Every structure is written in C-alpha cells, then in structure tokens.
Amino acid sequence: MPGSRKMANDEASNGQVTIYDIAREAGVSPSTVSRALSKPGRLSAKTEFKVRQVAERLGYLTVNSVEERPVLQSTGMIGAIAPDCRNPFYASILYYLRNALNEHGYDLLILETSSEHATGKQTVAKLTRIVDGLVFLSSTMSEPDLKRVVMTRPTVMINRSITGISSVTCDPQRAIDVAVRHLRETGHRSVSYLAGNANTWSSETRRRLIRTAAYRYNLVARTVRGFDITVAGGKQAFEQYLKRPTDAVFAYNDRLAIGFMAAARQAGMRIPDDVSVIGFDNIEESSAQAVPLSTIDQHTQVLGQQAAKALLDQIATESPRITSFTDSSEYIDRESVAPFKRSTMKLGPYVDLKAHDNDIITLTMLSSQFNETIPRIEAFMRAHPNIAIDPIEGHTQEQTNALYWERVTNSQSVPDLFNVERDKLPQFASAGVLLDIGTPQVERKWKRLYTDAVWQSSHYAGHLYGLPGDSGQTVMFYRQDILDRYGLDVPTTWEQFYEEGVRLHQRNPNRWMGIIDTTDVQHYLSFLRMAHGKPWTVTGTDSISFHLADSVIRKTVRFIQRCIDDGVLKAEPIWDGRYAAPADGTFATLIYANWFGKILASSYPASAGKWRVALPPSFGEPNDVCTAEIGGSVLTVSARISKKRQRAALQFAHWFQTNPESVDLRPLGGFSATRYFQDNPKILSTIDPYFNQRIYEVYVKSANLLNRDWDNLPFATRLSATYHDSLVPSLVPGGGSLDVIDQWATRLPEYAKSQGFTVE
C-alpha cells in the first residue's frame, strides 16, 4: 500500500509513531498490528496483548488522527452479554442497568449468549466495535478471551470475579451462614445443594460456602448435579435427590427450587414437613408459591446500578483503575423451611453423590480460598481415583483460622488437611492438633525438594508439622517514572531510602517513599527481620526467650518512627484482599512480599511497564541485603486422623506441593517453595508482561537472602490483637512507637506465662 507507506514516512519525519514502529518493536508484521488494534478477536490473546502493550508504551494509542489507528469515538451504546434473558434474575439486573445507563445518555444493546447465533467470541468481538463499553453478566467465557475484551473496551463483569477485570458481585457468605445456622437450630441435620449443570463461578462459590457452613454447624452436606437450572429441571433434580435424600435442600436458583417443590408435591411429599427448600435470587414468583419459598436475595437493583457506575467511571477516566464492588446477600425466611424438623436421615461422609464407593478415601481440606487451587486438586484426583479431596472454604485467612480453632476448642471434628500461613503454624502446633510428620525418612527425602529456609519455617520447636506451599520473601516494587521525575535513584540502603524519601515528600507532600501495611503485624515485623533483629526465640515446645530490648530492635524501631515523622513512610492498610487500596502513584516504592506483584498488576493495569522490581534496601552496606517473609503457606495434617487416612493425606500433600504437574498449574505471579520451581530456567527467563522484567530472577535472589534466624510466636492471634490495639495507633508522625515496643517487652512475656510457657 504505497499510500500507507508514504503516510508512515511522513509521520516518522514528524516524530510520530506508526504501526511499522510497533511492528518492529513487537516482532510482528504491520498487518498483524492493524488487526490487533482494529479487529480484536482475530488473533491470539497473547499476540494482541503484546501489540497493545507496545503501542501504549510508544504512545500510539493516545492519538486518533491516523487512519490505521482505532478511532474510539462514542457511539452512545453499551453492550450487555447475558446468558438467558428469560431468567427473571438476569432480566431484573438488565432492567436496572439499562435505567442507570439511560440517565447518562447511553442505550443498552443486549446480546443473549443462549441463542444460536450469539455464542462465539467472534460475535462478542463484533459487538466491541459498535459500543463504548461492555457488561458481562454471569459470563462463562474463558479468562483469556475476557481479558482480550478488556484490552479494547471498558469492561465490567456482574456475578463473576476475575483478577484484573472490574467486577460487581453479591457475596452470599453471611446469608448462607445465617440460613444454615437456622436449619441447624430448627433440627435439620443434613442438606443437599442442587448445583444443576451450571459450571459457573457463582455456582461453585455457593457450593463451597454451603459446604463450609454445613461443616461449621455439623450438618451433613451433599452436592447433586446433572440437570437444567430451570423449573423444568426441578423434576430431574428431585429424582436425583431421592437417591440419597436429606433434611433440607439449597437450589442454585429460585426457578430450580420451584420446580423441585412441584415435583416433590406430585410425589406425595410435604414441604416443608418432609424436606425444607431454600433458593437463590428472590424472584417475584418465589413469594407467590402455595408454600412461599425461603430464598437468598441477591439485590439485583444494587448489582445493575453499581455495574453502570463502574463502567461509566471507566469511560470517563483516561487511566481507569480496576474496581471491585461486593454487596452482601440477604436470607429471606419463609414457609418452605420447617420451624421444627426431626431428622431421620442416616447418611455417610461429606461427599458428592457419585463418590459413594467404599474404596474411596475422602479427605476434607480447609483453606481460605480454592479458586486457584481447584485445578491442582482435580489433577490429583484424576491421577489418584481412590482418594477424593473435599474442599472446605474459610473465605478469609482470619476466618479460616477461627473456624479451625473453634472446632478444636469445642472438641469437634477437624478437617483432615489444613492450609495455614507459616506465621500461624506454631499456634496450632503447640496446641497438639497437628500431626508431626517429621520422620527420619521424610526429613531425608522430602527436605531436598524445598529451599532450606521454607523447610525450616515449616517446623516448630524442631518438629515438622506440614509441607510448604508458596513462599513470600520481601522485594522492592518501585515506580521508575516517579523516581526519574524527582531525580531520585533506586535506593539500595535504608539510609538512602530515608534521604530520598525526605526530598520526595518535601517536593510533593501527597507522595511518600514507602508504606507500612497496618493490616497484619507481619509487615511491621519484616522490617525487624530485614535488619537482622530477632525479638524472640522459641527455645522449646513450651519455652520462649524475649529480646525486645535488644539494641538492634530499638534502633530499627527508632528508624521506622523517624521515617514516619519525616514523611518518608506512611502507615495504612495497603489492600482489601484483592486490590491495592492506595491510589497509584501515592507511593514511589512498596517493600512487600513477592506475591504482591500480581496485586499491583490487577490493581493498576494502566501502569504496566512503569513498575519495576528489585531487592529491598539493606540496613548495612548495599551488598548486605537481608530479606524477610510475609505470608507463605503450609499444608498440615490433623493429629486425629487414622493411620490409613494419614497415608492418603500425606500422599496428597506431597503431590500437591511438589509434583511438577501441580507446581506448573500454579497461576502466574505465585512463587512455589520448591527447588523445582526456583531452579527452572524457563521460569527464571520469563519476562513478566506487566513489569517487562524477569521478575523471578529477583524473587529467587530474595529467597536466597532470607534471614533464617527467626521464630514465629505460638500465639499469633494475641500478637496480632496487640499490634492493632497498641502499635498501629502510634504509627503516626510524632507517635511513640518505641514506648509501645517497650511495653511489649513486659506484656508479651506476661501473656506467654499465662498460657503455660516458660519465659527465659
């Protein structure tokens, strides 16, 4: 195309970027660049992402004056992709979404993916070219395809959550907990979840939460699958349910519940006398049944309006930030739940219907989240058909620990496997509820599969209580563009960090050099650990020595307070469990665990290429770097487990943590504690697309520089409460944090003595 070539040459002479510049930089042809930018969906997601990243870095997408560049003129239309508009739940959300958009001058174009001609990603790609933004409602599209769309248009998802994409969801955890507790209090002892054939994010989330609540309140829980999630599918659901009935039923949605109740009545069963029924969604028909249906209200008005707000904010902002809005569901109690139930069901273990073979060993596993680990669990069960893993999700790490501890203190059964953070491990190990797996054979054969530091930290008082999973050593994330703007260097020592931080804050009082995360005490302790400090030593299973008056500890505490006083460090919560809380650019650096890199990437997508990774500063000479650990998990086994199940649990734990297939299934951004992962040339040479850097090389260096002379206290819950009650309020300019540490030097030993520990 001579004309295009001439245009490109003219632009080049004017210093403007062309598609030929992008093609050279990305290593692709100019036609590929053109298709990637103007016709999304025609190339692989990886190629499109690479091209758009180069185009954004070169400044190409900031100007719309050239023919080859995609001209993003407003069409006044928003596209909504919904699975089934006949579903009252979806129809209600779309109603409120449309009304909210209409108020801002936008019309809503709805694409129903259940129709014959609207199922492919090519159809969605065509829609992106005629709308200003997109809303995906309960989408089942793959993550790569969804993230491809995000690169081309402002996008919000409703009823599904993926890191790196704005979402609006309704969290049913509290409502499910209330409903299951109500079932328990009214005499129900067993419950089935009718999941249908909906392999969706919301269905799996509900299943896990029902399973966890049932475990908390000692109800047998089953999952029944294999039918449409419609009124007609209710009959199929009832037939499946009859094979192994339970006292109560949760249905994936109200339509399925209504169909189930109709089939039950036709079979001569009474509702709720014979079986109690609870649905989801609170559609209008649920309250109009002969027996009004108890349900969990998903607040469709809130979902629709918040999705509109999130999308409009993206459209109006040049560098939109990923947002996550979560509303709380509400349990609506009606007549379909029996006020008094005498359970007559004699049921077996907590397993799905299909897992009834007596030769199958079913192991319960408690963890805070399973979204990223389910593929690994499924891979294990495919390879070991005689062992089934039954996940129990605790939601947050704090709630997970509380659930386990609650069952221990109430002398109730505990999960066979428990995924716990390493700093909390001693608390459970010292209580005698975890199995000491450190046989000479295990220590000899399995130790060599892990790095020395994480293997050591999976011990308590010389005994091995679990197998390490991920590893979270400290690194320094920094904004190179901010440092360059203010003429600052990447700090290699903490004194340099302080000096340059003072200069930065003096020139811009709204910026700080770094942050102290007040969410968890481990972040504050990481500073002491990086300074070669050791505030306490666990000298035995029941003895502790405290060193809080040590000169290194006091010097480091003074330094931290000086940084806060002079505007170098600011203490505040850093993230909400999914996304970083501060506005991007507030802090020039973030000294945090390596796993925070993927949090940055999902929180600040517009800053791709601006963030970099380095080792944290040194408290001594630049080459004397010492790192700390924040987070990191250990998979433990219950001390109450039988010998036969113990062997199965160890077989799973060993495979789950070390098998190459399992390690390779870990999501990008994670950092396995295994030598296989950290010595893998392919991983080390991987250039992360967000940081445009070989980040794993830095992560491995940090892991090798970890301060191993460190012990975690066997009462982490008390330490965390003390931190939030006394130290956090003092982490302000002019605060007396050193005085608080002096108080700790007295109070923590006193608490240790009260718990039966010998204080040396």
Image (cartoon, rainbow, N blue to C red):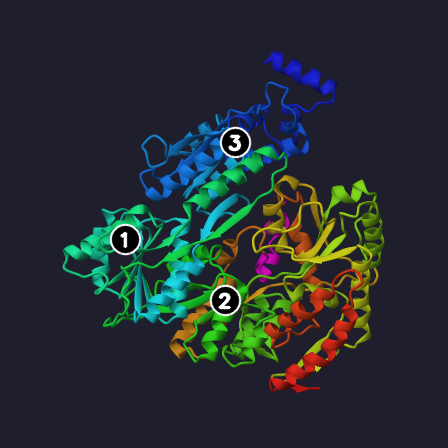
**Closer mark to the observer between disc 1 and disc 3:** 3
Q: Is residue 181 left or right of residue 31?
A: left
- Give the quadrant of residue 348: bottom left
Q: Earlier in the sequence, mark 1 or mark 3?
A: 3
Q: Residue at position x 33%, y 42% from top?
A: 88
Q: Which residues are magenta?
A: 671-687
Residue type of the residue flagged with mark 3: His
Residue highlighted by disc 1: 257
Q: Quadrant of the C terminus?
A: bottom right
**Closer mark to the observer between disc 2 and disc 1:** 1
State yes or no: residue 73 in magenta.
no
* Residue 400 circle label: 2
* Residue 104 circle label: 3
Q: Residue 671 in the image: state x and y as whole percent.
A: 59, 57
Q: Nearer the viewer, residue 47 or 383?
A: 47
Tell me if I can see residue 707 in this picture. no
Q: Are marks 1 and 3 in contact (CB under 8 Å)?
A: no
Q: Residue 713 in the image: state x and y as whole percent.
A: 64, 76
Residue type of the residue flagged with mark 1: Ala
Q: In the rendered view, would you say 551 is above or below 193?
A: below
